[in-house]
Image: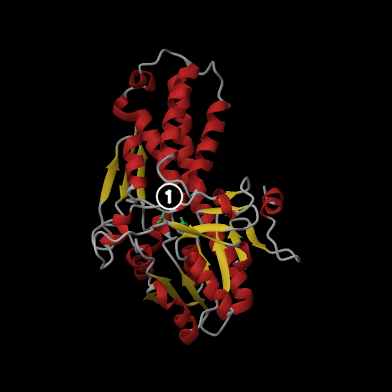
């Protein structure tokens, strides 16, 4: 059974005294009705858990990929040389690991966290001395990096929550606190813990300053109704579930101070890919005069991409959409998993190192912000 609230766990990662790693992930396809952890035995298992969306959310995808690699490389007590049939060669070992990393990045394309994690890992391996005892050193470094990612993600999310709550309360401290709207799931289930956009809500709630939070159902995968609603209930926040089509009328009738959403990739100009439906929510927020914030750790920034036009948007199988719709089974469907919200609709980007706001010319300087805070 998953623990309550902030202790809600998306995975369990352990390393025994012999250095063998093990990983189990909470099967999110079964939530909210069943809480079941399933073991990940190797890289193929990690790829499948990511692809099938048993685990999802940009930070968690990257973390499970790295931990899955760590498990794969330490499995059955064998050495990587045994597994690959490799000679005691540093470069052969490295190439073997790079092949596995390349395979993992094919699992889901839109969230940049996964490829950013693989670049980080590659840098670590590249810096290792070719004289090092091949297997133990490289595998140990990958295990250590997986642990580092877990700890860093939680502390980044807590900092995002703090910065977001401070910023919102500086303008919206109504008698009962702040009224939020969110989409998809960006909480403990999408991360190593606490969450990004939902982490902001969590921090406001912790301070007794969250008046309400509305979560959009988030068709067709229903991450809002299955997962965010579950986290809201576990945490005891004052939450309301609405269908995606109700957002405008909800804001009109019940009022909202800010939308806070997550991100799968934030470009250099602030254009942001996130769960499909985010763009529509941003347009509605603009129309209603409601602020629109993206909560994104640095690991979700893609400063190499100048704008959102070139983001690869994952298209999921039409069957996934038809399964949850009442429609003729042979109806042609278009099922993009994400959309891109142009920077002009975004009020600010909440990161672990502060809130990036627009310059006087109305644009975001993500590259300058990263440089200043690195
Ligand atoms: O398809 P999903 O469920 O992986 O999409 C998740 C989202 O779009 C989240 O908003 C995003 O990954 C940020 S999670 C902190």
Q: Where residue 261 appears, x then y in whole percent?
A: 50, 64
Residue 16 vertical placement versus 273 (above, below): above
Q: Residue furthest right?
A: 360
Residue 141 vertical placement versus 59 (above, below): above
Nearer to the camera, 79 or 54 = 54
- Residue 78 visible to an observer of this rendering: yes
Residue 145 vertical placement versus 183 (above, below): above
Graded by Cα atoms within 10 Å as few (under 14), some (14 to 19) or many (20 or more), the crowding at tag 1 reads many
Q: Where residue 287 appears, x then y in whole percent?
A: 57, 78
Ligand 1 is within 8 Å of the C-beta of the residue at disc 1: yes
Q: Where residue 192 appears, x then y in whole percent?
A: 43, 51
Q: Residue at coordinates 52% horizontally, 75% vertically from top-left?
A: 284
Nearer to the camera, 271 or 351 = 271
The answer to whether 282 appears left or right of 356 in the picture is left
Q: Quadrant of ligand 1?
A: bottom left
Question: Which coloring applies here?
Answer: secondary structure
Q: Residue at coordinates 49% horizontally, 59% vertically from top-left?
A: 339
Q: Which residue is mark 1?
A: 60
Q: Residue at coordinates 35% horizontally, 70% vertically from top-left?
A: 233
Q: Where residue 223 appears, x then y in whole percent?
A: 37, 62
For the N terminus, the image quarter is: bottom left
> What is the number of callouts on the image?
1
Quadrant in the rendering for residue 333: bottom left
Q: Residue at coordinates 36% horizontally, 54% vertically from top-left?
A: 9
- Residue 200 visible to an observer of this rendering: no
Circle 1: element type:
helix
The answer to whether 101 appears left or right of 358 in the picture is left
The answer to whether 61 appears left or right of 341 in the picture is left
């Amino acid at each position: 059974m998953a623990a309550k609230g902030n202790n809600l766990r998306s995975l369990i990662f352990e390393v025994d005294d012999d250095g063998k790693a093990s990983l189990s992930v909470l099967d999110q396809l079964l939530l909210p009705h069943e809480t079941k952890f399933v073991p990940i035995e190797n890289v193929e298992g990690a790829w499948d858990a990511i692809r099938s969306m048993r685990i999802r959310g940009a930070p968690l995808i990257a973390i499970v990929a790295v931990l899955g690699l760590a498990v794969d490389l330490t499995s059955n007590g064998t050495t990587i040389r045994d597994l690959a049939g490799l000679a005691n060669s540093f470069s052969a070992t490295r190439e073997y690991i790079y092949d596995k990393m390349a395979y993992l990045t094919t699992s889901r394309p839109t969230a940049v966290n996964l490829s950013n994690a693989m670049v980080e890992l590659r840098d670590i391996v590249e810096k290792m001395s070719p004289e090092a005892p091949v297997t133990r050193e490289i595998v140990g470094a990958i295990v250590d990096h997986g642990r580092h990612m877990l700890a860093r993600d939680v502390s980044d999310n807590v900092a995002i929550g703090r910065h977001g709550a401070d910023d919102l309360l500086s303008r919206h401290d109504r008698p009962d606190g702040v009224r939020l709207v969110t989409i998809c799931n960006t909480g403990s289930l999408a991360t190593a813990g606490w969450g990004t956009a939902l982490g902001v809500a969590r921090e406001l709630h912790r301070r007794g300053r969250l008046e309400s939070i509305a979560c959009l159902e988030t068709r067709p995968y229903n991450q809002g109704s299955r997962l965010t609603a579950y986290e809201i209930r576990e945490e005891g926040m004052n939450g309301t579930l609405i269908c995606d089509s109700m957002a405008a009328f909800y804001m009109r009738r019940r009022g909202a101070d800010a939308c806070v959403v997550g991100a799968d990739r934030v470009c250099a100009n602030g254009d942001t890919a996130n769960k499909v439906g985010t763009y529509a929510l941003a347009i509605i927020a603009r129309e209603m005069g409601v602020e629109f914030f993206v909560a994104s750790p640095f690991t979700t920034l893609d400063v190499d991409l100048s704008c959102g036009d070139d983001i690869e948007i994952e298209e999921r199988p039409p069957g996934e959409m038809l399964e949850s719709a009442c429609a003729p089974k042979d109806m042609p469907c278009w099922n993009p998993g994400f959309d891109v919200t142009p920077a002009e609709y975004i009020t600010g980007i909440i990161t672990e190192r502060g809130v990036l706001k627009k310059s006087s010319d109305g644009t975001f300087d993500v590259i300058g912000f990263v440089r200043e805070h690195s």
